[in-house]
Image (tube, rainbow, N blue to C red):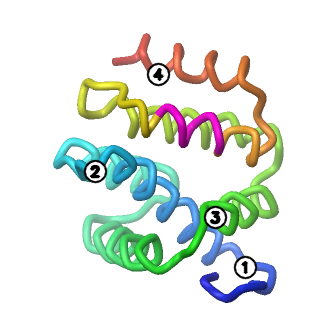
Amino acid sequence: MTAPEPDPLDDGDARLALAALLVRIARADGDYAREEIARIDKLLASRYGLGPFEVTKLRSEAEQLENEAPDTVRFTRAIKDAVPYEARSGIVEALWEIVLADGERDHEEDALMRLVAPMLGINDRDSALARQRVERRA
């Protein structure tokens, strides 16, 4: 996934791409907070039916991948290729959960969300609606 022209990804790689994108959004403000890490773990466990050991392993791999990946496009392309359009609003909700996990909306996180949502095929209005659903649940 870090190659200049990566090959199409399988489902396991798409899972890793989503985890790496969650890590990237959490790190966007320069503060990779405990609350964000816990929320990433919870989202991955729930989405993929993973136990604590598997979640920690996946997140650790995602953290390394996020460090090495030159851009966000690789993550969004992998997710877009593997996740049907109807389910991508759930991905955007998961991203908003990470942005809002520490109780603050940071400018860098907002900017990354404005970039990522369209890359996933989600328009600004639907991204805002996803954010509002997350805020109502909080």
Q: Earlier in the sequence, mark 3 or mark 1?
A: 1
Amino acid carrying mark 1 in the image:
Asp
Q: Which mark is residue 75?
A: 3
Amino acid carrying mark 2 in the image:
Gly
Q: Quadrant of residue 89?
A: top right
Amino acid carrying mark 3 in the image:
Phe
- Nearer to us of marks 4 and 3 is 3
Q: Earlier in the sequence, mark 1 or mark 2?
A: 1
Place of residue 99 in the rendered image (x, y in percent of width and height, measured from the top left): 40, 35
Per the model, the C-alpha gap separating discs 3 and 1 is: 13 Å
Per the model, the C-alpha gap separating discs 4 and 2 is: 22 Å
Amino acid carrying mark 4 in the image:
Val
Q: Earlier in the sequence, mark 3 or mark 2?
A: 2
Per the model, the C-alpha gap separating discs 1 and 4 is: 29 Å
Query: Which residue corresponds to mark 2?
Result: 30
Indicate left or right for 28 with 85 as reference: left
Q: Which mark is residue 10?
A: 1
Q: Is residue 112 magenta?
A: yes
Q: Which mark is residue 134?
A: 4
Place of residue 121 in the rendered image (x, y in percent of width and height, measured from the top left): 81, 41
Place of residue 28 in the rendered image (x, y in percent of width and height, measured from the top left): 39, 49
